[in-house]
Image (cartoon, rainbow, N blue to C red):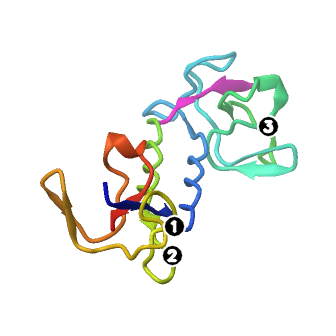
């Protein structure tokens, strides 16, 4: 067989971080569980020195679950323990798939390993009825490693 190995092109970027968890009230802005279940949520409200205009997952006493203030003082500060639980908003979309692995020759278009190491790669070439114009990872006999026709 006349083939040569290719190396991985620059590594693909890491996948993006998933969006943060978002918590929601029901459609009437009412808490859905907890001590304030069925009570209206007050927005904005201040908790721990921070002002929130939507359900929040802050506060260790809430185990990271979403909640809202169902009672606030005259300055909009949360009055403990007057809270109501929120539900997860519609789930975030899944992160995009990582880009496909790309295989490259060296800078002089030469195979870097395999039986054809040091030989020029020929492009385009046909393999398995498909034409390729760059290194390819197809072919079980190549263990999924990149290769080109030499």
Q: CA distance from mark 1 to mark 3?
A: 65 Å
| Badge number at residue 130 | none
Number of marks present in the image shown: 3
Judging by the rendered image, the residue that carries numbered circle 1 is: 112
Judging by the rendered image, the residue that carries numbered circle 2 is: 106
Q: Is residue 80 visible?
A: no
- Is mark 2 in CB contact (under 8 Å) with mark 1? yes
Quadrant in which the C terminus appears: bottom left
Q: Is residue 148 left or right of residue 20?
A: left
- Is mark 2 in CB contact (under 8 Å) with mark 3? no
Q: Is residue 64 visible?
A: yes
Main secondary structure of the magenta stretch: strand
Q: Residues within 10 Å of mark 2 (few under 14, many from 20)?
A: some
Q: Nearer the viewer, mark 1 or mark 3?
A: 1
Q: CA distance from mark 2 to mark 3?
A: 63 Å
**Which badge, 2 or 1, comes first in the chain's sequence?**
2
Judging by the rendered image, the residue that carries numbered circle 3 is: 78
Residue 3: x %, y % from top left: 35, 60
What are the residue bounds of the magenta stretch? Answer: 82-89
Q: Residue at x 27, y 74 (%)?
A: 123
Q: Residues within 10 Å of mark 3 (few under 14, many from 20)?
A: many
Q: Residue at x 31, y 54 (%)?
A: 1
Q: Residue at x 65, y 31 (%)?
A: 66
Q: CA distance from mark 2 to mark 1?
A: 7 Å
Q: Is residue 60 left or right of residue 35?
A: right
Q: Judge whether residue 88 is colored magenta.
A: yes
Q: Residues within 10 Å of mark 1 (few under 14, many from 20)?
A: many
Residue 111: x %, y % from top left: 45, 69
- Please determine whether, in this image, residue 12 is positioned above or below residue 29: below
């Amino acid at each position: 067989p006349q083939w040569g190995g290719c190396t991985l092109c620059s590594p693909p970027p890491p996948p993006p971080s998933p969006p943060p968890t978002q918590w929601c009230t029901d459609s009437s802005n009412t808490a859905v569980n907890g001590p304030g279940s069925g009570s209206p949520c007050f927005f904005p409200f201040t908790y721990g020195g921070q002002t929130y205009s939507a359900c929040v997952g802050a506060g260790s006493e809430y185990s990271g679950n979403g909640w809202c203030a169902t009672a606030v003082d005259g300055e909009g500060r949360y009055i403990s323990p007057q809270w109501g639980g929120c539900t997860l908003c519609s789930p975030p979309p899944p992160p995009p798939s990582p880009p496909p692995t790309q295989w490259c020759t060296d800078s002089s278009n030469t195979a870097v390993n395999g039986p054809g190491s040091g030989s020029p790669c020929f492009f385009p070439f046909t393999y398995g009825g498909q034409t390729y114009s760059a290194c390819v990872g197809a072919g079980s006999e190549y263990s999924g490693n990149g290769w080109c026709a030499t």
